[in-house]
Image (tube, rainbow, N blue to C red):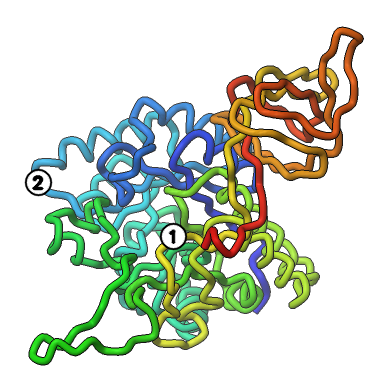
Amino acid sequence: MPFQNRIEIMAPAGSFESLAAALQGGADSVYFGVGKLNMRSRATVNFSEEDLPEIVERCHEAGAKAYLTLNIIVYDEELEAVHALCDAARKAGVDAVIASDLAVISYARSIGLEVHMSVQANVCNMASVKFYAQYADVVVLARELTLAQIRHIIESIRKEGVKGPSGELLRVEIFAHGALCVAVSGKCHMSLAAYNSSANRGACFQNCRRAYRVTDEETGNELVIDNKYVMSPKDLCTIPVLDQLLDAGVSVLKLEGRGRSSDYVRTVTSVYREAARACQDGTFSADRAEAWMKRLESVFNRGFWQGGYYLGVKWGEWSGSANSRAALLKIHIARVENFYKKNGVAALFLEAGGLSAGQTILITGPTTGAVRMEVAAMRRETAEGMEPVEAAQKGETVYLAVPEQVRRRDKVYLLRPRMLEDA
């Protein structure tokens, strides 16, 4: 089966900084939440309804679509707020809402707002696909399906001509990269039971990510288990099998990470953009996949479960840790004091640490997104003028050429390899 002409890379955004990073990375679409009506309602950074016009404008200027996640379960007392948010989204030009609750879906359709089915709907078969095709133009398949099952569903959609409300053939989206939940398609009640804080309302306390001991209550004997993190799966990574997934007919690749940093978002988005393009032009290979994996390992991850359930494995691989296994650590050292656009030079005030030529830094900001670079050379201002310097200390200002535009007050981080003691 031939690859689609265009594979949509759908990137996450939990802030304007990560929104910029997603667009820098080559995202075809960006998904985001607003306020408390989304599955990341506990996030410290979230968008507001007033941000919608700017989000849409930024996405459309970059040639990307803007998707609003409205994928929590909804109670009667919230319907008025849901309707108001859908109305605001339509007015702002949001391209689609991602939802699983029929109250949200039916209202969005009634005002002409495109709908995409959330993974929370747990779509596993053609009967479900046909049902949701009445409302949605894109259906996300359950993360627990195998590659063969995905292929069968997509072939059936094409054979039977199943179309969404737009009149176009229904498109299939899969979860391609990022954190996995121990529960089936995220339908978990652990946090609700322990803290009266529901994961299905975007307020998960992530009990599953903690270390546990298994004890026999009658004897007090502790059972020997592989590791203490028995409910914390490794992150899904489909790069090694991406050619197989796209060959099956998948149209949209969803990347998880609305709670992640801008560096994570840009790195993951750009890797999947490059890999999808390689699948389409015939240059995808095991060697290239290995190189892409190395880049993914540099940002937040809990270790990778390569291929996930798609390869037919019926149980996840456990992370063995509560912390990120990112190969690089970020250490805040400076802020951007000025940027000279004419010659592409930034002035960095080293407010928290020193910097040397040859080190790698990351510059982040709400408009800048994430710019990673190696420091080739630095200059320092003296009474005699600018002079080259190999190293500078905390409290100094240095000048260096940067590959992309940065802005005043952007944060600067030193990236260094993770040591054993950092694990």
Vertical relation: 121 (above or below) 307: above
Residue 120 visible within the image: yes
Vertical relation: 281 (above or below) 363: below
Q: Is residue 273 left or right of residue 130?
A: right
Q: From the image, which quarter does the N terminus lie in?
A: bottom right
Along the viewing direction, whichever of 62 and 397 lies nearer the viewer: 397
What is the x, y in percent for residue 337? 66, 18
User: Secondary structure beneath disc 1?
Assistant: strand
Q: Which mark is residue 138?
A: 1
Along the viewing direction, whichever of 373 and 102 lies nearer the viewer: 373
Q: Report which quarter residue 359 is drawn in.
A: top right
What is the x, y in percent for residue 410? 60, 27
Q: Is residue 255 left or right of residue 39?
A: right
Residue in the image at 42% along x and 77% along y: 318
Residue in the image at 39% along x and 85% along y: 226
Residue neighbourhood size for the residue with mark 2, other residues' Cα within 10 Å, grouped as few (<14), some (14–19), many (≥20): few
User: Secondary structure beneath disc 2?
Assistant: helix
Residue neighbourhood size for the residue with mark 1, other residues' Cα within 10 Å, grouped as few (<14), some (14–19), many (≥20): many
Q: Which mark is residue 150?
A: none
Vertical relation: 409 (above or below) 201: above
What is the x, y in percent for residue 423? 52, 63
Residue in the image at 54% along x and 48% along y: 29
Vertical relation: 24 (above or below) 344: below
Q: Is residue 120 left or right of residue 296?
A: left
Pair 1/2: label in front = 2
Residue in the image at 31% along x and 77% along y: 127
Residue 252 visible within the image: no
Quick check: marks 1 and 2 in contact, CB under 8 Å?
no
N-terminal of the pair, mark 1 or mark 2, is 2
Pointer 2 residue = 76
